[in-house]
Image: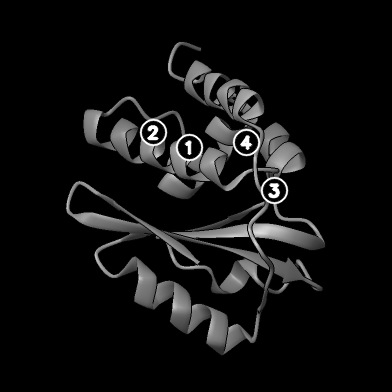
């Protein structure tokens, strides 16, 4: 688990292994998203941009969770975003944002008995490309 402090709140992220994708969505609260991408930095950046877009009123999705997916996929179509970066069987990132994100994530992992996986090292050049794709939603 990694925790980032941002504007008085926490963003906590864990890499998990999902065996059954269908059951997890029903239990995700509004301050939690699960996604299948390569780098944890990409997820954190998309989450920060999604939160900022709601502060400014420039969000494209109805929820922060949806906005995170749109930004990760670099599209305005939620269906396309789900296909590209939605949770899949295997390794995914689970991210929580809010005042007690670390505790919320820890409790959810324990409650669902989710197996954590180590964080991969992300290539700096690839991360830059992911950041560009994430930010492009702002101008679409």
Residue reaching furthest to the top: 139
SS for tag 4?
helix
Q: In the rendered image of this protein, does residue 45 appear above or below residue 11?
A: above
Dots 3, 2 in contact, CB < 8 A: no
At a point 48% along the width and 49% down the height, the residue shown is 65
Q: Which of marks 4 and 1 is nearer the N terminus?
A: 1
Q: Name the residue under label 3.
A: 86
Rendered image: mark on residue 78: 4
SS for tag 1?
helix
Residue 80, how many percent across, how many down?
A: 72, 32
Q: Earlier in the sequence, mark 3 or mark 4?
A: 4
| Image quadrant assignment for residue 18 | bottom right
Viewer-proximal residue, 7 or 86? 7
Question: Label 3 to label 2, Cα distance in Å?
Answer: 18 Å
Dots 4, 1 in contact, CB < 8 A: no
Q: Name the residue under label 2.
A: 49
């Amino acid at each position: 688990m990694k925790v980032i402090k941002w504007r008085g709140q926490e963003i906590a992220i864990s890499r998990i292994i999902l065996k059954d994708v269908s059951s997890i969505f029903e239990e995700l609260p509004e301050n939690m998203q699960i996604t299948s991408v390569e780098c944890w930095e990409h997820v954190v950046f998309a989450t920060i941009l999604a939160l900022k877009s709601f502060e400014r009123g420039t969000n494209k999705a109805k929820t922060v969770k949806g906005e995170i997916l749109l930004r990760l996929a670099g599209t305005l179509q939620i269906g396309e975003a789900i296909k590209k970066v939605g949770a899949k069987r295997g390794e995914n990132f689970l991210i929580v944002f809010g005042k007690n994100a670390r505790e919320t994530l820890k409790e959810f992992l324990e409650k669902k008995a989710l197996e954590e996986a180590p964080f991969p090292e992300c290539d700096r050049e690839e991360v830059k490309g992911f950041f560009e794709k994430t930010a492009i939603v702002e101008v679409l």
